[in-house]
Image (tube, rainbow, N blue to C red):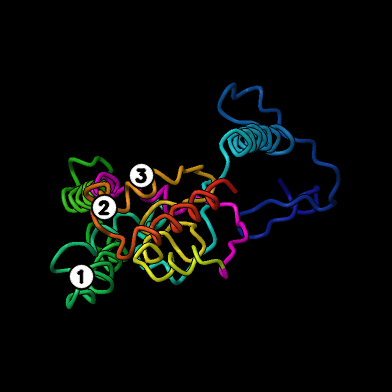
Amino acid sequence: MHRGKGMKFVGDSRVPEKGGFVPPKDYSEYPGKMEAFLPNFLLKEWMVGAVFLVGFLVLTMVEPSPLEAEADPTKSGYIPLPDWYFLFLYQLLKYPYAAGQYKVMGAIVIPGLALVGLLLAPWLDKGPERRPAKRPIATGLMLLAIISIFYLTWESTVSHDWRQAAQQGKIVKKVSIDKSSKGYKIYSSQSCVNCHGQNLEGQVGPTFIGKNIPASLVEQVAVKGIPPKMPANAFKGSKKDLKTLAEFIAKSSKK
């Protein structure tokens, strides 16, 4: 085509001299392989996103969030547990050479080496082969990482005391305790307060609030205990004080 006949040559491209409306390409000649981005492809993406959003909202309504009670720094027996995606690191810190005096190894050195290995992965195997069997270095490192994370996560979940965790994080209704009463003074002077909390809300031991515990049971447990967590003869005092304590706990447990 000669110069001036409606086309201009710009390098290897041919640009029309006068711009105008360019109709979208007819993709019918490539069935199932190509489609217009707008609105076909974008509409499909929005629809998929809407389905996942609705499903996520349904799950949040059906299964409430696992909220725990307000954090209390006085609870020394609280067993923390991170979110599921940090469980493998949490488990790593339980092993002898990654905890205690070696905590720098478990908290910084080992995760740091893993991160550096991940950053160096593109340079460790630069071959053009895409099949995993033909890329032993990259495949081996990836399998090692996946197996390690899965094992540490599983080990963390099976070794965790879920029953105690549910008890210690249970949201207990706050009630007013008569701390000027003789029963509370006896309660606070005994070892009860260390396990069951200042407000009978429970710490290492269970809460008394809302349990409707009879006074006779309190007297029995204070003397005989409930092995292995509740030792026998935990109460140190007279029978009169024990009776006063039992009546106080029984009355408070009905709130």
Query: Which residue is at the front of the view, 101 or 57?
Result: 101
Q: Position of residue 105 (x, y in %)?
A: 20, 73
The amino acid marked with disc number 1 is Ala
The label number, if any, that marks residue 163 in the structure image = 3
Name the residue type under label 3.
Answer: Arg
Q: Which quadrant would residue 93 be assigned to in this image?
A: bottom left
Label 3 vs 2, first from the N-terminus: 3
| Res. 229 mark | 2
Mark toward the start of the polypeptide (1 vs 3): 1
Indicate whether residue 174 is drawn in magenta: yes
- Which residue appears at 58% of the width and 62% of the height? 177
Start-end of magenta stretch? 153-180
Q: Which mark is residue 99?
A: 1
- Give residue 197's quadrant in the image: bottom left
Classify 10 Å Cα crowding around label 2: few (below 14), some (14-19), many (20 and above).
few
Front residue of 123 and 75 = 75
